[in-house]
Amino acid sequence: MKTDKYSVGVIGAGVMGERMMNALCSHERFCLTTVADVSPDRAKEAARHAGGASWHTDHRELLAREGLDLVYLAVPPKFHHPIALDVLASGRHLLCEKPLANTTKEAEEMLRAARAAGVIHAMHFPLYYRPVYAELKRRLEALGTIRRIDIVTHFHQWPRPWQQTAWLSGREQGGFIREVLPHFLHLTQSLFGRLRVVRSDVEYPADPLACEVGVSALLQVEDGTPVTINGLSGIARQEHLSYTVYGTEGTLSVVNWGTLLAGGRGEPLAEVPLPDENRLHQLLDELAAALDGREARLIGFETGVEVQNVLEALLDLS
Ligand SMILES: NC(=O)c1ccc[n+]([C@@H]2O[C@H](COP(=O)([O-])OP(=O)(O)OC[C@H]3O[C@@H](n4cnc5c(N)ncnc54)[C@H](O)[C@@H]3O)[C@@H](O)[C@H]2O)c1
């Protein structure tokens, strides 16, 4: 176990990069030493904010630095694959944003490279580290027979007001199917097992470069339990995300990431009080444990490949 802090480099200093950099700078086991972003202004500002980390506009310069233990990759999805392969070739441990890649083929190559490099590979699915996950899992048994799981992703505006970047509105790598659904696909797989897409109807606008505006899909988990997806953007309803598990004895619903609602037979749903925890620190605690050589609760690239497979089937890309 290393007694001094683990040295981390961040590639991609956008919305997510900034959040993770704040968490890294306030975590006792990590030191943010270097940042890379193709935008020199972003790289420079992030490095200044981190108290004098080095900054680069080419990720290969970041990888050339000595003493770097871990890289966090938070660039748009289509750049995950080439940059991740460079990170892995340099022998660094890698925490990669979701979705793992832009295609299953890329994701599989990343998994192979990570295994060959013998490094720690992990993905960032924040729900898994939130108190809502543990409580949802704990309460599943009391639901009786699970009849259905419903995933609702509704947006009055896409991309969302806080995430106004061009790539998110494009068909190539953006859209809420790629950007938001991986969280719920991973949640479902981690609680109920592998997912299979039975049918998926994706609604696209006339502009061939623009991302989807709707999806209606039916999936199944391994035991045959149906999972529905109802996704829409550009509707009047304020952004609303929910993940609802319907059982014969009870209902559980995760609303807007952090709120858990529960109810028994014939009862209205009521909010379940949950502790307030820093989910990014939870993930960083687990990463530190893995780097120390201890048991850790991480989501590896194998899982990223599985989620990518489902995404590809939903988007009918195969
Ligand atoms: N886990 C989560 O909860 C969560 C939330 C939001 C976004 N994300 C994921 O994080 C990733 C980044 O999303 P974002 O919202 O921060 O995007 P963003 O557009 O805000 O930031 C991306 C940054 O990467 C930089 N960049 C682009 N190409 C680069 C390259 N080749 N080398 C270095 N820098 C490059 C851009 O200049 C930009 O600063 C995406 O994969 C997204 O799906 C995850």
Image: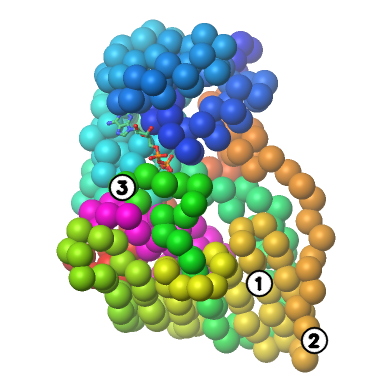
In the image, 46 versus 82, the foreground residue is 46
Do the residues bearing badges 3 and 2 touch, measured as CB atoms within 8 Å?
Answer: no
Q: Main secondary structure of the magenta part?
A: helix
Element marked by disc 1: strand
Cα gap from disc 2 to disc 1, whole angstroms: 13 Å
**Image vertical order of residue 294 relative to residue 231, above or below:** above
Q: Residue furthest bottom?
A: 266
List the residue tagged with mark 3: 167
Q: What's the residue type where badge 1 is placed? A: Ser
Residue name at image x 34 percent, y 16 percent: 56
Is the C-beta of the residue carrying label 3 under 8 Å from the nearest atom of ligand 1? yes
Quadrant that contains the N terminus: top right
- Which percent across, then down, holds residue 267? 80, 86
Is residue 276 something that shows in the picture? yes
Do the residues bearing badges 2 and 1 touch, measured as CB atoms within 8 Å?
Answer: no
- Which percent across, then down, holds residue 254? 64, 66
How many numbered circles does the render carry? 3
Q: Residues within 10 Å of mark 2 (few under 14, many from 20)?
A: few
Quadrant that contains the C terminus: bottom left
List the residue tagged with mark 1: 253
Cα gap from disc 3 to disc 2, whole angstroms: 43 Å
Residue 236 left/right relative to 246: left
Could you tell which of marks 2 and 1 lies nearer the N-terminus? 1
Is residue 90 something that shows in the picture? no
- Which percent across, then down, holds residue 165? 37, 45
Q: Which image quarter: residue 219? A: bottom left
List the residue tagged with mark 2: 267
**Image vertical order of residue 113 relative to residue 39, above or below:** below
Q: What's the residue type where badge 2 is placed? A: Glu
Tell me where the magenta segment starts and ends, as one range: 169-195
In the image, 169 versus 73, the foreground residue is 169
